[in-house]
Image (spheres, rainbow, N blue to C red):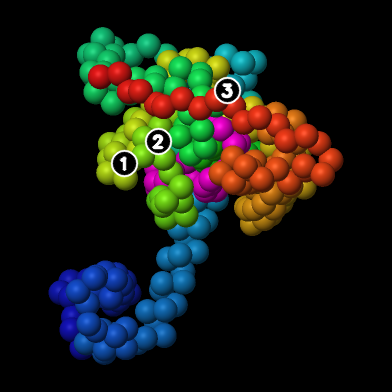
Amino acid sequence: AHRLGNVSEREAKRHYFRLIQETFESPTNTWTIEALCRFCGVSKSGYYRWKKITQVNIEKREREDQVAFSLILEAFNYRQKPKGQRQILMHLAHNRTPMCRSKIRRLMKKFNLVCPIRKPRFQRQVSAEYQAEHVKPNYVKREFRAYGPRSVLLTDITYLPYGRQKWAYLATVKDAFTNEILSYELSPMLHIAFVLKMIRQLIAQHPVSLATQTLIHSDQGSHFTSVKFQYLVENNGLIQSMSRRGNCWDNAPQESFYGHMKDEIDLASCEDYEDVKKLIEEYMDYYNNERYQWNLAKLSPIQYYQFCTTNVYPLADIYSTPALPHIRTIEIEE
């Protein structure tokens, strides 16, 4: 067995367990877990026991972070007056739920909660330079239904409260012409990965139907101005468009969808994340296939897309076939 000098046996085993995990997960690894354990002089059962305990600790930390962040978010939104870190710290203290500033800062960064408090001029200049580089023009200009199916896609993220001060985050891509939700992703954390996954699903599930010039429109949130998001979008031939800062009407149909969805689902009945996941899956299926809309010729979003592409109206035996809207070609101003 291999030994580490001047280190306790327990610490040495932890070191080898981490080494085994890193080696086994390496793309070039050809060793089995059993062989790695034998080489390091530790038992396979001990390795799996350590791995289970480590995962439990990670999940426990994540649950604790979500509970703490819910307190921060409640303080941030208290009386509809957003606050900076110091105001949040004092508010929590007055409510007998004290929290150190470093933890508040860490969780606000982790969950992408941005302080509106003014920062030193240098930081504002950096922010302005970043905005100039990463904020895209508003090509849509509220003409959501001018260009036909799969031409203007709207995307956004919404918060879903459930259980006892818990939060889930939902990102969606909506076809502005048919109102169909083309892709969505739910996450217990507000990180960039679940938004990127949503875009990859969009590309994988709709490789042919997306128009030659497809706009994907969002607000100026940090997820959509991130380098990773913009690279993924551009690399797949999508043209990014953004609302003007602080103007929710520039993405109104997406905002409207979230409002109707929250009115129609019962988040209060959800006790854990899996309940929320099931609820959202059921609603998306219902919304796309069975939620008939007056402005879609009394059809569901998927039915309306089929009507647009085939000109076969499924209610022709009841109603006269409606005329389809006039469609223009997208013109991108250089």
Q: Earlier in the sequence, mark 2 or mark 1?
A: 2
In this rendering, would 27 be left or right of 218? left
The mark total stands at: 3
Structural distance between the alpha carbons of marks 3 and 1 = 24 Å
Residue type indicated by callout 3: Ala
Q: Earlier in the sequence, mark 3 or mark 2?
A: 2
Residue where numbered disc 1 is placed: 237
Which residues, given as a range, are shown in magenta? 176-199
Q: Tell me the tag on residue 214.
A: 2
Visible in this render: residue 152?
Answer: yes
Residue type indicated by callout 1: Gly
Residue type indicated by callout 2: Thr
Q: Tell me the tag on residue 252.
A: 3
Q: Which of the 4 image quadrants contains residue 33?
A: bottom left
Q: Earlier in the sequence, mark 3 or mark 1?
A: 1
Mark 2–mark 1 CB contact (< 8 Å): yes
Q: What element carries label 1?
A: loop
**Residue 324 percent across, percent down from the top left:** 62, 31
Of residues 232 and 33, the one drawn nearer to the viewer in this rendering: 232
Q: How crowded is mark 3: few (under 14 residues within 10 Å), some or many (20 or more)?
A: few
54 drawn magenta = no
Structural distance between the alpha carbons of marks 3 and 2 = 19 Å
